[in-house]
Image (tube, rainbow, N blue to C red):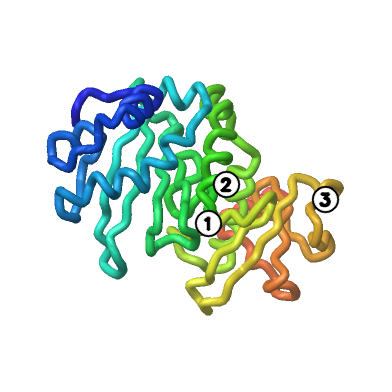
Amino acid sequence: MPDELSVRQWQEQFRAGAFNLQDRYTQCRAGWYDWFCQDHALAGRLKKIGRVVMGITDPFILDNYYVWFKNNCPLNGPLYDDARFEPLSGNRDGKYFVISLDSPHERMKWALVTERYGFDAPEFDCRDIREMIRYVNSIGPELQKGVIPPFIAEKDAVTAYARQRGEPEGLHIYRDGDHQYSYTSRRDRRKRTVLAAASLENAPAGFVSEQAHAVKGMYLYCPEDVGIPLPEHPENIKKSREKKGVER
C-alpha cells in the first residue's frame, strides 16, 4: 500500500480530482488494496464508497486515521465495497472500524463494524448515508479519549445470555437502538429481542422487571423467552456447589 494519507489529506486529493483516472496506479494511490472487479471499474466504485469518507468532519478521525478500500467477493451475492479506517499510529487499540456499502451479509445498505463492538455484527447500520456519516462523526470523541460506551457491556451480557440459552459461539448480536439487541437463534431460527438495563430503576420502555434475568452485571429481558427458565451457567453451578461444600 502506498504511503498513507490522513483522511483529511485524502479528502483534499479526492476533491482535486487526483483519483479520477481509471488506471491501476491511480486507484492504488486512492487506497484500493484488494479487488475482484475489473481495474477500470475501481474509479466508479470509489466515487460511491468515497461519499461516506467525504462526509467525515470529526477532527480526530480526519487527522489520526487513514482509509483504504476493499472490493469483496462473497460466496453468494454480488461484489460489494468497504472503506477501512486504520489509526495512522499503526496501533488499532480497539479503534479500527469498517464501513460497508450494499453488503449481502448485512441487514442495511450501510453498515459500520467496529473493533470495539466486535466483528460479529455492526455497531450501527442504516439505509441513509447521512445517518451513517452523522454516527461516525459522533464516535470520534469517544475514539480519541478511548471511551468504552455502555452498550459494549450490554452486548457482552446479551452474548452471555444467549450462550446460557444454548446458543453457539459466534452468534450475531445486533444492536437495534439504545439498550435493545436482537439475534436469530441457531437452535430454532426464531428471532430474539433482548432489552438491557444497568439497573431496574432505569430500565428502558417495554422492560418487564419481573421477567428479567441478571447476567454479567446487567438485567436482561427477552419477551420471546418469557416463562422459560434460564439454565444456570456451568461456571455458576460450579461456584454454587463449591459454596455448598464449604457450608457443609
What amino acid type should be assigned to the residue bearing mark 2? Glu
Give the distance between the C-alpha atoms of the residues marked 2 and 3, in whole angstroms: 31 Å
User: Tag 1's secondary structure?
Assistant: loop
Percent position (x, y) of residue 148?
Answer: 58, 33
Residues under labels 2 and 1: Cα distance? 8 Å
Q: Badge 3, how many Cα within 10 Å: few under 14, some, many 20+?
A: some
User: Would you say 19 lies left or right of 214 here?
Assistant: left
- Name which residue lies at 37% across and 41% down: 50
Q: How dense is the environment of label 2, judged by Cα within 10 Å: few (below 14), some, or many (20 and up)?
A: few
- Image location (x, y in percent) of residue 244: 69, 55
Give me the residue at 58% from left, 67% from top.
165
Q: Amino acid at mark 1?
A: Arg
Q: Nearer the viewer, residue 14 or 66?
A: 14
- Residue type at numbered disc 3: Leu
Work out whether residue 37 or residue 40 is closer to the camera in this orientation and state it: 40
Relative depth, front residue between 93 and 42: 42
Tags 2 and 1 touching, CB below 8 Å: yes
Q: Which residue is labeled 2 in the image?
A: 131
What residue is pinned by disc 1?
A: 127
Where residue 103 appears, as percent x and y from the top left, is 38, 59
Q: Does dot 3 land on a helix, a strand or a loop?
A: helix
Q: Is 78 rendered above or below residue 32? A: below
- Residue, disc 3: 200
Is residue 245 at all visible to an observer of this figure?
A: no
Instruction: Name the N-terminal-most of marks 1 and 3.
Output: 1
Q: Is residue 117 above or below residue 163?
A: above
